[in-house]
Image: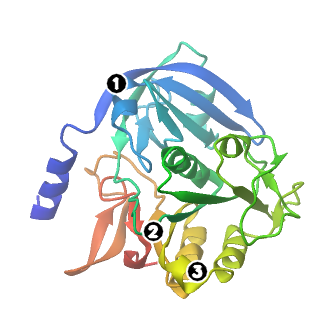
Amino acid sequence: MSSAAQQVAQRNRGTIFVEDGEILSREALAGDQYVQRIRAPRTAANAKAGSFVAITCDPMLPMRRPMSIMRAQDDWIEILYKTHGEGLALLAEKEPGTSVSVLGPIGMPFNLDPAKPNCLLIGGGVGIPPMVYLADVMRNDDTWRPLAILGSEIPFPFDLVPSSLPFEDLTDENSATMPLLESWGVPTRLTTKQGYDGCFDGYVTDLADRWLDGQNAETLAATKIFTCGPTPMLKAVAELAARYDVACEVSLEEYMACAVGGCAGCAVLIETPEGQAMKRVCVDGPVFDATTVVW
């Protein structure tokens, strides 16, 4: 094992747990999407925004499925996912009271910088849950001024309601928002190319570009973008951040086998002070500085 790999292994020792989780609730949503709340005390106590879990979906399928944590409170976590493949379809059938094996929390979290209190949260599709978690962290601390832009090309996994919170420097002709973030006081706007009522007709980067273009140099210097979603979207957000010279962290998505750094199946090319190197999304990430990712 290389010295770098040894350091990562040491860093994660005693921070990732395996526990028998209990499904507390299951909500079926449009587009074959589900929200499940799972009692997993050790995971919930140690999770941070950007963390994920690997869950055994069924005893007949030993390979775990990695899923972002959307919320973590008290002794429970929440996950949001779309059924894609046999494993998640089986998980979606699990009723409250069912036990599932939870491995977590895994991964390096988002890094908040007090020098950059203007936080633009950009989530696309399955990248929405980490943005919700990050907003939850920020909402009770006056240090942060979060704004969220969420996009989806399938029905959003929540009811669309008009927002009463102004999204500064953007007009309100498209003011549909996520009720949970609205209740937290986090201004949020939704984007899609599917024509959903109240949503901006375009991509998350189109709306983010409009907002960034309306800011002065002082505001941009105090702004940081946090984003999660499909790789093409992340690349586009990283390019947008570079154009405006705004700090940006991306939470990458890759197929995973072990999810704890052993198989290296999720490795991506990253710029490091020593040159380019393959880094594992599961334990070296999933959060990386956007400027270090070799797209």
Query: Between 169 and 209, which is closer to the camera in this rendering?
Result: 169
Whether residue 108 is situated above or below residue 56 in the rendered picture: below
The residue that disc 3 covers is 240
* Residue that carries the numbered disc 2 in the rendered image: 116
Q: Which mark is residue 6?
A: none
Q: Specify the amino acid type for callout 3.
A: Leu
Residue at 70% from the left image edge and 56% from the top image edge: 188
Give, as a three-letter code, the residue at label 2. Answer: Lys
Q: Are marks 2 and 1 in contact (CB under 8 Å)?
A: no
Q: Check disc 1 and report the residue beneath it.
A: 19
Q: Residue at x 61, y 51 (%)?
A: 128
* Whole-percent x, y for residue 251 in the image: 46, 60
Residue shown at 59% from the left, 76% from the top: 236
Q: Tag 3, which secondary structure? A: helix
Q: Earlier in the sequence, mark 2 or mark 3?
A: 2
Left or right side of 47 for 28: right
The image quarter in which residue 33 lies: top right
Q: Amino acid at mark 1?
A: Glu
Of residues 213 and 45, the one drawn nearer to the viewer in this rendering: 213
